Image (cartoon, rainbow, N blue to C red):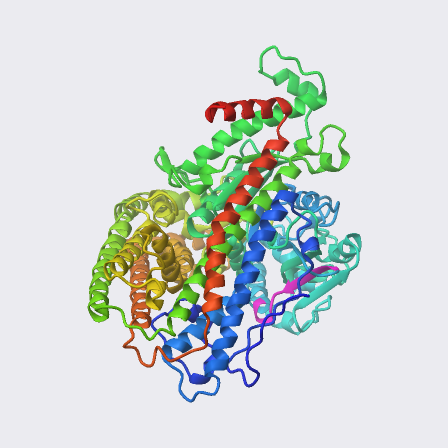
């Protein structure tokens, strides 16, 4: 008979302390309204059966995931039982102790905590690179997402995930009315400036693409001739397509092909044949992003989201901001480039550079190059240029495999070098080319996670995956990418469950201690000693953070010095075009309208603010990455200092427990240290400290992006008045006059300390982060000491007996290691069985020799 989770006492359920507050975001705040604690946990969404949810995993992976999910489920049940007992105990009380309120809200926050945050894998590439074809192959649905051909797909973000739904579903999210009005105003400004008397003439379908993009969007939404209307006229005009008031269009279908047909008009459109477009196609310029959900996929596990990310962003501010945020929230980025463009080229380098920035400012830990369309090869040409000795190539297939392996080796070396060292060269953001002093600049720390991955390059062929005329399914490397996805899911699930069970165990230790009426020997003296120790260690942590952040000072200063000496050359290269100003003044106007940033479907991304600050980023990037990296301890890394603080606190608590001679059944000893054995005890103390300090790492990661972008955003803010002035210029020689305004503005701001202000802004952001960390640590530890002390305000009010829940939680916590060992053993056995017989025999012989058999 299926077990059911206990429900809280029925009745009114006022708002509870927010999960952020309950998980340590503000641990100082223990006091809330008394009725805040009476809240029923959220109803969990309906989930598909275990057999269906694990279809995408192989047998060994299924076993590992089931064990982790069983651990998580049992932990939630224990937490729910404890929550119900506490509610029943205090439900009718007029006054609830502050510590008990804190405890109940922490329990609720853990019960409602999501099972697993989505794992975003970004497919980052230009139109035609093969992103959609690759996703179609991974999900085993040929032509499910429209691919680039004679029709051009939209530049919106498309997310594909597997869910518990019974049907295929797509949600098309549109710009809000206000967001579209903002874009409409900029589009009309861009177009009508060219019609002013004396204005520079330009062919609307010839130039740098800004005018063409604007005309196309207006005609698509309002019909032919819309480009000749002003902003007010367009506001009164009726769009040709149907726009729902909810700004969300939901499509559903029983079969993949059926949904594909419904979705196709929304994300595929002819470039110039506006009059022949359907009503669905006509709302394309209003589409913000698309979410596609597959039912119970056997190839993409639930919890993983594949994201088709355009390579350049968008002219609309909201879409462009979503573009940046989507890149930053991806834990892995695959840079997609077809075989004919992978050997270099401007677009490929820009994509790779943007991916490296995501490692610096966002959550990205892995960057890989996925080379598509690798079945393409002209055999005679390849044989003529081949330089691989006397080994003969007998067939097209052998040539493709040989070429693919060669590309994999070459691009792996190149990519690793580019992740380590990136030439100090401004790509001038699609306008011109600025040359800075030669010499490599390290972009990521030498021990960055992105450099440790074994596979940096994949050579895939979606076409051969379906046809299998030249390559086998394994040789197309589509299965290899699926394996990567599964491994990411399992690793993240293991990390999440370990953290969840540890935090829950610490909370149950604390809950069980509330019923203790026993005073520790010399309790007051020990707590006073512990408070002094915490104060000393907190001061040491504060100084360590200051020293850690001090590593950014010198490269930041050097970057400012280089920026001051090179900004004229950079700006000049950005504003000069070899073929004159024909059409360029409209692109420049688009840049100014968006405060120095312009993204279109036809041009590389333009960011003048980033261009002039690139010398600063060249200097700070390796140090910045070192500060926020996890793993190996280093003076310049932040998290090891915080971990050292936690460890010192654990040791001090264990020392107090042992020296005090606490009894084995002491509840307070269970809270601070469970066993006399120090190693075992530290494990329990770590659980409690993790429970109290929860959320600190997330706070740091959320602040990281704001710190990194503070330099370019400071420059953008200083130059904003000049962008606005330049955007208003029309008439004769408009382009040169706009350039003059920008040059004059930059010169004036540099003279007034523009780069120095950007430096100060980043320093201020680091200072705010330091203050935030120390405040949270002080508040968290103060909370813990208050809860430990029996002198608290009614803290040890008699509660329901939760000793059985505590014992169950202790068993679950101890089983973490066993589950992890079992998963590792299964993975090793699975890898062994995949080997060829000869290789397996060699490995087995080596293993016997190592163990003396």
Q: Is residue 596 magenta?
A: no
User: In the rendered picture of this protein, how many numbered marks are placed on residues?
Assistant: 0
Residue furthest to the bottom in view is 94
Given residues 2 and 192, the one toward you in this image is: 2
> In x, y percent, where is residue 69?
58, 56
Given residues 641 and 7, the one toward you in this image is: 7
**Quarter-of-image position of residue 444:** top left
Residue at the spot x=34%, y=66% of the render? 666
> In x, y percent, where is residue 163?
67, 58
User: 720 left or right of 205?
Assistant: left
Q: Judge whether residue 361 can be spotted in this image.
A: yes
The answer to whether 243 is drawn above or below residue 420 in the figure is below
Which quarter of the rendered picture does the N terminus lie within? bottom right
Given residues 6 and 758, the one toward you in this image is: 6
> In x, y percent, where is residue 162?
66, 55
Q: Is residue 169 magenta?
A: yes
The answer to whether 161 is drawn above or below residue 669 in the figure is above
Given residues 47 and 320, the one toward you in this image is: 47
The answer to whether 497 is drawn above or below residue 178 in the figure is above
User: 729 left or right of 642?
Assistant: right
Specify the segment rendered in magenta. Answer: 167-179
Q: Judge whether residue 585 can be spotted in this image.
A: no
> In x, y percent, where is residue 785?
29, 69
Residue at the spot x=59%, y=26% of the render? 840
């Amino acid at each position: 008979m299926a077990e059911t989770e206990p429900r809280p006492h029925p009745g009114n359920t006022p708002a509870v302390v927010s999960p952020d507050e309950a998980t340590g975001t503000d641990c100082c705040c223990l006091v809330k309204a008394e009725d805040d604690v009476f809240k029923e946990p959220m109803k969990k969404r309906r989930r598909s059966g275990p057999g269906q949810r694990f279809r995408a995993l192989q047998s060994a992976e299924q076993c590992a995931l089931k064990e982790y999910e069983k651990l998580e489920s049992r932990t939630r049940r224990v937490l729910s039982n404890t929550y119900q007992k506490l509610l029943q105990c205090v439900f009718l009380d007029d006054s609830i102790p502050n510590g008990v309120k804190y405890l109940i809200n922490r329990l609720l926050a853990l019960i409602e905590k999501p099972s697993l945050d989505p794992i975003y894998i970004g497919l980052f590439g230009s139109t035609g690179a093969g992103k959609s074809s690759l996703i179609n192959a991974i999900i085993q649905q040929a032509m499910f997402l429209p691919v680039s051909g004679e029709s051009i797909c939209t530049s919106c973000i498309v997310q594909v995930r597997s869910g518990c739904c019974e049907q295929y579903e797509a949600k098309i999210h549109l710009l809000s009315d206000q967001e579209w009005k903002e874009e409409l105003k900029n589009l009309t400004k861009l177009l009508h400036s060219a019609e002013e008397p004396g204005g520079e003439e330009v062919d609307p379908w010839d130039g740098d693409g800004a005018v063409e993009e604007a005309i196309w969007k207006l005609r698509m939404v309002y019909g032919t001739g819309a480009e000749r209307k002003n902003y007010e006229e367009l506001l009164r005009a009726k769009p040709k397509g149907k726009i729902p008031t909810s700004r969300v269009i939901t499509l559903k279908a029983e079969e993949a092909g059926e949904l594909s047909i419904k979705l196709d008009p929304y994300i595929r459109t002819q470039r110039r044949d506006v009059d022949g477009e359907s009503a669905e196609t006509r709302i394309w310029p209003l589409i913000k992003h698309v979410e596609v959900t597959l039912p119970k996929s056997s190839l993409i596990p639930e919890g993983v989201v594949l994201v088709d990310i355009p390579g350049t962003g968008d002219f609309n501010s909201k879409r462009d901001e979503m573009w940046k945020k989507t890149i930053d929230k991806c834990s892995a980025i695959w840079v997609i480039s077809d075989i004919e463009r992978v050997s270099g080229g401007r677009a490929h380098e820009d994509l790779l550079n943007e991916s490296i920035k995501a490692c610096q400012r966002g959550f990205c830990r892995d960057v890989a190059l996925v080379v598509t369309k690798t079945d393409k090869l002209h055999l005679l040409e390849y044989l003529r240029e081949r330089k691989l000795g006397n080994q003969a190539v007998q067939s097209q297939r052998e040539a493709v495999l040989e070429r693919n392996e060669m590309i994999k080796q070459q691009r792996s070396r190149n990519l690793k070098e580019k992740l380590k060292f990136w030439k100090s060269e401004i790509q001038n953001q699609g306008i011109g080319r600025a040359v800075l002093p030669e010499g490599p600049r390290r972009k990521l720390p030498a021990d960055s996670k992105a450099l440790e991955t074994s596979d940096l390059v994949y050579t895939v062929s979606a076409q051969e995956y379906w046809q299998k005329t030249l390559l086998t399914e394994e040789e197309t490397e589509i299965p290899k990418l699926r394996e990567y996805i599964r491994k990411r899911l399992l690793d993240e699930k293991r990390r999440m469950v370990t953290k969840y069970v540890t935090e829950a165990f610490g909370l149950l230790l604390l809950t069980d201690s509330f019923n203790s009426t026993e005073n520790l020997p010399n309790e007051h003296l020990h707590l006073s000693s512990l408070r002094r120790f915490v104060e000393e260690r907190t001061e040491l942590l504060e100084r360590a953070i200051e020293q850690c952040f001090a590593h950014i000072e010198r490269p930041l200063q050097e970057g400012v010095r280089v920026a001051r000496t090179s900004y004229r050359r950079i700006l000049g290269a950005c504003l000069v075009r070899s073929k004159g100003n024909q059409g360029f003044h409209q692109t420049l106007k688009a840049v100014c309208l968006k405060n120095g940033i312009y993204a279109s479907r036809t041009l590389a991304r333009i960011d003048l603010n980033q261009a002039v600050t690139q010398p600063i980023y060249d200097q700070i990037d390796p140090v910045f990455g070192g500060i926020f990296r996890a793993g190996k301890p280093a003076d310049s890394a932040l998290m090891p200092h915080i971990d050292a603080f936690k460890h010192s606190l654990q040791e001090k608590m264990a020392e107090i427990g042992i020296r005090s001679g606490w009894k084995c059944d002491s509840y307070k000893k269970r809270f601070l240290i469970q066993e006399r054995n120090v190693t075992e005890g530290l494990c329990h103390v770590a659980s409690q400290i993790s429970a109290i300090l929860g959320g600190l790492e997330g706070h740091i990661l959320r602040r990281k992006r704001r710190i990194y972008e503070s330099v370019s955003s400071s420059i953008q803010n200083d130059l904003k008045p000049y962008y606005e002035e330049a955007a208003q210029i029309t008439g004769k020689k408009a382009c040169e006059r706009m350039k003059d305004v920008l040059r004059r503005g930059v010169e004036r701001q540099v003279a007034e300390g523009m780069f120095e202000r950007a430096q100060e802004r980043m320093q201020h952001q680091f200072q705010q982060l330091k203050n935030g960390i120390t405040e949270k640590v002080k508040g968290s530890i103060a909370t813990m000491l208050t809860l430990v002390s029996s002198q608290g305000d009614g803290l040890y009010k008699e509660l329901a007996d939760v000793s059985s829940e505590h014992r169950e939680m202790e068993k679950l916590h101890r089983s973490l290691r066993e589950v992890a060992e079992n998963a590792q053993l299964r993975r090793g056995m699975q890898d062994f069985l995949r080997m060829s017989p000869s290789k397996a025999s060699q490995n087995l012989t080596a293993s016997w020799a190592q163990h003396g058999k």
